[in-house]
Amino acid sequence: MINAVLVFNNAGQPRLTKFYTQLVWIKIRVCYILLTIYQETSVQQRLISEIFTLVANRPDSACNFLPLPPLLASSSKSTTPTTPYNDTPSLVTYRHYATLYFMVISTSTESPLALLDLIQVFVQALDGLFENVCELDLIFNFETLHATLGEMIVGGVVVETQLEKVIDGVKAQGRVAKRPVNEGKGGLSLAGFGRGEDGVWAGR
Amino acid sequence: MRSDLSPKRVVRRDMRRRAVVSSPVRRAARKAFSVCVQVSGVSEERSSERGQGSEDAADFLRKVGAFWERARAAGGGMEAGGWSRFEKDLYDLIRGLRNHKGTEKEYITASIAECRKEIRSNDMDLKSTALMKLTYLEMFGHDMSWASFNVLEVMSSPKYRHKRTAYLAAVQSFRRDTEVLMLAENQLKKDICSPTPTVISLPLGAIPHVVNPSMANSLLTDLLPRLTHSNAAIRKKTVVTLYRLALVYPETLRPAWPKIKERLQDDNEDPTVTAAIVNVVCELGWRRPQDFLPLAPRLFDLLVEGGNNWMSIKLIKLFATLTPLEPRLIKKLLPPLTKIIRETSAMSLLYECINGIIQGGILDAVEGTAEGEEVARLCVGKLRGMMVIEGDANLKYVALLAFEKIVRSHPHLVSQQQDVILECIDDPDISIRMRALDLVVGMVNTDNLTAIVGRLMRQLRNAPIASSADDPVHDRGRSEGITPYAESDDSDAEESLRPAEQQSNLPQALPEDYRVNVIRRILEMCSRDTYANITDFEWYIDVLVQLVRVSPATKISSSAGDEDDEYERPDDVGRGIGKELQNVAVRVKSVRSEAVDAAQSLVLVDRRDQMFPSSGNGGQGVLEYAGWLVGEYANYLTNTEGVMTSLLHPTSVQLPSRILAVYLQAVPKVFASMSGNDQISWTPERKTLMSLLMARIIHFLEPLSTHPSLEVQERAVEYLELMRLAAEAASGTATGTEHGEFTDPPLLLTQAIPALFSGAELNPVAPGAQRKVPLPDDLDLDTPINTNLHFLLAQAEQEAFEDDEDDVYAAYTQPLVSNSYSSQSLAPTIVSASERLDAPHKEPTSYQNAVEEEYLDPDIIARRKAERRERYKDDPFYIDPEGQHGSGAVTPLGSIVRAGNVGEEVDIDSIPIMDLELERHGDDREISRQRSPRRIPKRVEIIGDETLGPAEDNSSREDIVAPRSSSYRNKKSLLEVDSSGLGDLILDDDGSASSNRKLTRLEIERKEQEEAEMRKALQEVERLRLEMQRASERLQIKDEAVVVRKKKKKVRKAEMEGDVLVEGQGEGNVDGEANVEGAVKKKKKKKGKKEEGGGEAAVEGEEVGKKKKKKRRTVIMDEGA
């Protein structure tokens, strides 16, 4: 099951945050007093910044799987390794496209390589919707971004992996706005999108 | 290319300008452009629709909104005129953010304040725009939970665009405990039943995020029909939503599962729906695999048909959980799986096939057969291929994951691939390293242990300790959330490719948690099975000492009482290392002196710079155990005086209280070993030295007797008194003459104090041993020892101070003339006190070992060399590389050989006599200590745990020593879904017996619990409604006193209704408390419905003021009761 999908840019600015499971604030003894101060949103932000610190220092040649960020790792260590499947998020998969990082946090029931393909489909779908998608499109149309994700993943379960159906689904919801034209200086093709197509093996 | 200005934008700007100038026109103008330009114009919407004014049914929400509007209007008309000027949409907000570089915080605060105003307006467009802005800001961590009620308002708008915004806001901001959720149910139900598919999709996507048990119960009936909706997209989303419902409300599956199954079995079903169902079944499958066995034939068909790789992956994962239950599946699965492995072009599918074979236990099942051999070879071969393939780190990573799973059952298969795996330990990618690390722990054995640990040590030693700047603690946004900051220009967001690599100074700094992880793994590998893999314990001790030096600093926790924390902080590896050192010293007698030596060098203050990392407090935890070792095995110490000085050093006081307490215990032990010798005459010299020493100890202990930590305080006070007593005894005992006959030292020093600490030797005890000690038959715990205890205690209290202490004092201070106690074992060699004082601590000297040099620090290597040389000094076959300083290659053996080559007779005199050259290496003298000559290959005796009877396998030390671990395990992870209830549910696979099946006791209990929850939830709804009504009432009473009077008649009616309702609630409560049986349950259910009805009635009459007061009162009474 997918626990969360995050998109943020090279500077760690969130562009999309979607949590499919509710964040449970663990009552760590030390922070107990601070419990009232911590809002859930700030836990989310902490998680994002932790993941960002992890991901930002990775070279492009590194693999696309992250070790668990401290916030998740501290609690999941206690789980017994004998049960192959459980509910704890254990996999952080990411892909880096141009200025954006796409992250998926998931449990061990998801296939790591398939998730990479899923992210690729997500980006291709966005590209199909926006024509040469770039970060600005996603900033100004974050509703469409959410809608696209909603066509692919519902409640943490993948419902669609076919590019055309995803695009059709979003288009059925209404015209997809282009980004404000005077903002942009030019789009960029998917090929310019990080490692793009050639980085993908023949998955899916 | 989007360089040209759009005409639309121009028009829009124009309008904006006009809007600012002329307020009356504003609304109309805004309307117009919002339709033509705004964000995502939904074409099918008609602009004539007005959000407000339509008398929609159940528009109670709207009316409360109206109240807000009125409140605002009443609050300040001037304000109302003012804020319109700043009204802006999402684009403006984003653009504004980008333009306010440096002052984003102020800008955001201002924007949120605007949104607060806008969201209360009557204009639905304005509301939804404000909501969208808030949702955008929420992404950056700005709380919008206060707006949850407004989210509901917008949700109830008939326009799709508004709905979409509101649903998005709900998904992003609602939590399971958001109060208004109960009010949202009706809206969700309504949208689920909408005729337009796009509208149905909205609640389907949102429900998984917010659903709670009571809500699941009420939405279920509306969701089920959607499973047969004509639109495939709706069907598949419904399936997933039902799954999420089942997670919080397992009863969902009872009606839903047969229908889902029907969809799955249907061959004509849309393949994407089938794929979605398979996804859901896979998620459910590992929780309750037995229920899905009957589906196996259909699932198998789907797998063989292939087509959708994503679905195949899920199917394989599902089968991996089914095979343990149904071994016959294995035979059937093997051919298609191997076929896929051989044929597929998708790497992910290939990998999952291998993974499925491993996880499903297929490898085990077919082991021994020819087929099994082939499968194993195929899998491992493919995995190896993934490892060595060039340039794809991802494959390397997943292959390591798969190997890790194999290694538990088939270590031999993995160790064949040792070469490629070991390389991954040094991979530049931390993720791969971590995986490889996990893997090698599993595949370590006697032969490769040294090599693997060597590799890891080299890593630790050669990489710099990560600076504090790399530490996530100091990272921006960790504590106060991320502020969206303005990019200086758009180039960044537009840029096609930015090189991600930032630093290339090699070797890269290792993150601390990785460092900690490596150290832990090394300890784990070495200590496995009570050191089964270690042959050379001296090597291990050196590794431990080296580990202390590379251990990262522990984070100083902010909370105050942290030092007394009995929890072991995960990043404190120092203690782990210390534990190992202690363990080795206790268990392996043959290296005890080496272990104590290591502990001594760690404790010595003047060597602290060398032994510990130069910065931070890394590895400090080791002192706790080193302190214990130097105390417990004080007779092994080579530098007793130095250790004592270090223990008493002023810096010791600053150590954490836990370590300080151990130090305090070590001080008298070391003291006892220094002073306890009764073979030496009590000369004036000795007396002075002892008095001085005791004075130092007293001086050290005195301030500690008021230490905040109780443990430290108690020990300090105890030993302080003891030392004072001893000091008095020492000063009171007359000394013998300088070179006269033997004078006995005070007994307190030679007898009493050493007796405190010597006795039975400490041995490791098995975890369960204590429990196995048989109870003696004659043990009677019930009979009072003294029936007159009370009296005795009272008496003792009176007489407490009348005891004659002088006797005790005299007994210890008067030296006995007879010399019958000879505790020779304590001090085998007689060394005068002054000699002891002078005894220098042993300094390391040297030999060559190319491998160790890479990961051990020079001084450790030097010491090892010296030890080795010492050991082999009589061995003519040992070539000392440094033995002949200056004379190069001439070694004793070498010269003999050379001489032999020349053909001369071997001249005995020409064999150089080895010069020990002890002075060469500093002026330190080797302490004469018996070292056992090295036995090669030596079988080290490791003391196992002591226990009674056969050892229990199941009683792991952790369970007994740390019982809290069980509760710890239950702790929820941050993002975890709680599905514990799901596993208990019994699904009827044929779907027919469900009605007449007997309910188990557990189910009954759960049902009752659920219903109690429902009741509580409904009461909560009621309370909320009342609260809101109360709020509006307060204002309405002022404004509309006339209206209330007019409606008096209606009020009375409503009042009665309310009374009935309250009565019902009261009864329900009584039921909930008294009822255990299932019979009452039905009645309760009815009550629940009644309450609901009552609630609706209350909504109908909600404008009326007076009634609510009364209701509120009764509800409060209810709560009190």
Image (tube, helix red, strand yellow):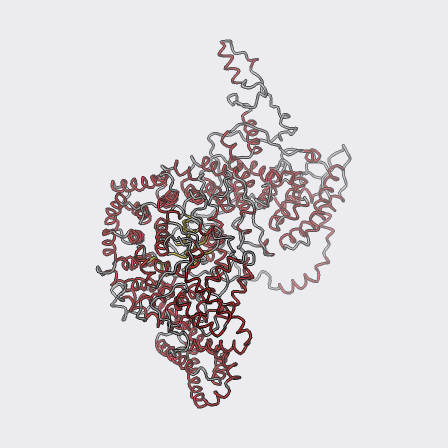
Name the residue at the left extreme: B267
Q: Which quadrant of the figure contains the N terminus of chain A? A: bottom left
In-image side of A143 versus B847 (left or right): left
Of residue B13 and residue B331, the one placed in the foreground of this image is B13
Q: Is residue B15 left or right of residue B927?
A: left
Q: Position of residue B138 (x, y in %)?
A: 48, 62
Q: Residue at x 58, y 38 (%)?
A: B598
Q: Position of residue B899 (x, y in %)?
A: 51, 12
User: Camera-side residue: B718 or B1081?
Assistant: B1081
Q: Image quadrant of residue A146?
A: bottom left
Res. B970 in view: no
Q: Quadrant of residue B254?
A: bottom left
Q: Is residue B906 above or below residue B182?
A: above
- Total numbered labels: 0
Question: Percent x, y for residue B423?
Answer: 42, 37
Name, please, the residue furthest toward the top: B904
Q: Position of residue B104 (x, y in %)?
A: 54, 59
In this rendering, is residue B76 above or below B982? Answer: below
Nearest the viewer among B160 and A92 is: B160
Using residue B342 as the reference point, say whether residue B439 is left or right of it. right
Instruction: Using the image as rendered, state which of residue B1055 and residue B691 is in the foreground.
Output: B1055
Is residue B85 in sight in this rendering? yes
